[in-house]
Amino acid sequence: MIRSVNPLAQEPRYELIGRVLRENILSGVLPQGFVLLEGPIAAVMQTSRVPVQSALRQLLEDGLIHRFDGRGYLVGQGGADVIPIRRDIRELELEIPQVVDEALQTRGTWRHVYDKVEEEVASCQIFGEFRIVETELADHLGVSRTVVRDVLARLQERGLVRKSPSSHWIAGPLTARTVSEKFELRGIMEPAALRLAGPHIRYAEVEALLERTGTDPGITPQYLGDALLELCIAQAPNTALVEMIRSNRLLLSSVDRALILLGLPRDEDTIEQYQTLLDLITHHPIDSACEYLRYHLSITARRYLARMKIVAVIDETGSFAPYLSPQ
Amino acid sequence: MKDDAKPELSTPPIVPRRKLRVLGTSITLLKPVRDRAKADLGFDIAFEKMDFLSCQRWAAMEPDSYDIYEQCFHNLDIVWFWGALQPIDIGRIPEWDNISDLVKLGGVSKYAGRGRGDAPAKKLYVQPGGFLGPKPSRYVSMLPTVHNMDSFGYDARIFGEGPDVRPSWAWLLDRRAKGRIALVDEPAIGFFDAALAAEAAGELEFADIGNMTIDEINALMKLLEDRRAEGYFRGTWRDGVEAAELAEEGAVAVQSMWSPVYGKLRKARAHFVESAPSEGYRAWHGGGSLSRHLRGAELDMAYEYLNWWLSGYAGAVMARQGYYISNPQRAREWMMPEEWAYWYEGAAAARDLSGPDGEVAVRAGERRAGGPYVDRARRIVIWNTVMDEYNYAARAWERFVRRVNEGAAT
């Protein structure tokens, strides 16, 4: 996953625009009677007009601007005595907080929406096959089709969507075969990477984690799985191998998260296995940890396949994003 | 209370009668069984009856809402791996040693065929790591009770009768029945009737019919879809009442069938007969499980109920609708010799025999297709199964069923 550092990076663009306009109205930079037009605002914010429209609608509902007998909106509550001020917004010194500005700057790229879409597209696949229509995804995200195509290209690169013969974007279905193959790959790659990582493992952090495991309820099997990857396996000096491992785990982890959302209870057996594994890593020859990891993965695969069967009897209403159309 | 000025008349403290909550399906939750259990056991029982899929979903997601889960071994994975159940200690089941080898070993004898798919033995014993498997241990996932070998029913006027007729699952795709074929709509059951039909008809071959690959599932669904488009299927059914209606109306010439349905036929009785398929049977095995939340006195009550199932009466009621119990000798104590001879030994009925509701289900002189219990059990080729690719197969099946029934409506 690509995690942005900017806390606002995942916020919808119209909210960021609304935030800037609101603050400038309240501080008086945008005076009573100022005529707000979509085009110039979009130019200042470096976006398309669609999110500007949404932002203005919101400000109207909040009573910060009002409609008048002309194009655009007037700042303020309105009234007969208000004289429209027609100036180019670009001439005003709008205050745009740096963090918002940065978030807006990344808006032009696919990165700010990617993580969420990736999670949704991956986890829906237990519910069968889905089609993604570019325009619907663009509307849903409030971004251009160019951005959507970049997102889909990235998803395709990661093996989460494919193009059908009729050029439709298709996701899923996640089959037992896919799951078995992915676990088989894990069984080949992860022990190998763990062995390579031996001298580079962040032992102090693994020890600290081991101490907390079993007492700290926040330490879930998923947390341990991620920690094992980051602190141990991903320390292997072969970056191509690590990238393949991450990519291969993507779909499995998303589905795992989806199952937990559906109510899958916490699994104590798995936590015990991670404890054994972390203990082997820190206190014993790395080969023993590699063998145990292989065993742990084969058990996990069996349990995973059994758990997937419940999805067939679950009511799937509301379990996937609106731009995903079941086929 | 405000008006407690007359303390001498205050009501005695209400001690609520203990209550056991049983979640199950129409297979086992029959009225005579429910009534008798309530009468025999020293506590109230609330029975909740659901259709197969809802029952599984509810059992997995809401384990606190029931104490006993009555269902089948083949869909146990769904509930077990969601952590909703707790193991049963066979040390607390006095009848355990009398439970048949069909469920413990997978076959009625060492030499009997084992059957593909989810044979109950594969899901019976709790293994290390919380898995289920055939290796004996002190704990089991489900106490085995009711079971049967299912087949299909056919119109003898179309397919013929007499000793020379060799019923085949292929009849479920036979052109003589075109437009008059129905399948049971359950992806772990009807799906295999269709798969057996496809193999028997020589249309397809599966490496392991009990755990099909995606390609095999696709091939089966394509075959079914082609036949559907040609108008082969009359419809699908979900319970015995619907199955009986289809046969009574003469709407079907061949269809999936459950044993109790034959006893309910009236008009169709003379010509709509049970098959003993030459390829063998599709079997299933039911039982009862304990919800994970049970402790102490509640757990004791649940064990009492499970043990009651094996005490004979319930087994006799099940026999009267054509189902077998895992410890038949105890049920025999509650059956008339003629009943035992007909249902378990394959003899001709010495007189009219009643079904569980008291109505005549078998006429004097009739003989059960397939013969005695042991012969039928030896010929199990597949068990109802929730395969690895169940999630995929069930969706494909659902689309097929929807199209069949849309077609029937137009």
Image (cartoon, coloured by chain):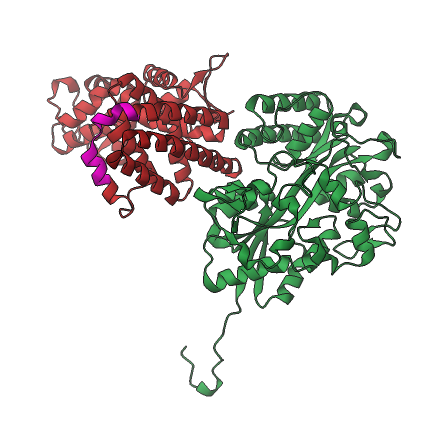
Chain colours: A red, B green
Q: Is residue A195 magenta?
A: yes
Note whether A125 is above or below B21 in the view shown: above
List x then y, in percent, for residue A261.
39, 39
The location of residue B130, given as percent across then percent down, is 46, 44
Quadrant showing the N terminus of chain A: top left
- Work out whether A147 lies above or below B1: above
* Main secondary structure found in the magenta portion: helix
- Seen from the viewer's position, the closer of residues B396 and B258 is B258
Specify whether A138 is left or right of B93.
left
Q: Residue A296 versus residue B20: which sits nearer the camera?
A: A296
State left or right for residue B123 relative to residue B326.
Answer: left
Is residue B19 among what the camera can see?
A: yes
Instruction: Find the magenta span and give its range.
Output: A194-209
- Above or below residue A144? Residue A121 is below
Q: Residue at x 64, y 66 (%)?
A: B40
- Residue B154 x, y percent position in the rendering: 80, 35
Where's residue B159, x and y in %?
84, 30
Task: Confirm whether the magenta stretch covers residue B232.
Answer: no
Q: Quadrant of residue A94?
A: top left
- Please name the residue shown 74% across and 55% down the image: B356
**Front in this rendered view, residue B99 or B158:** B99
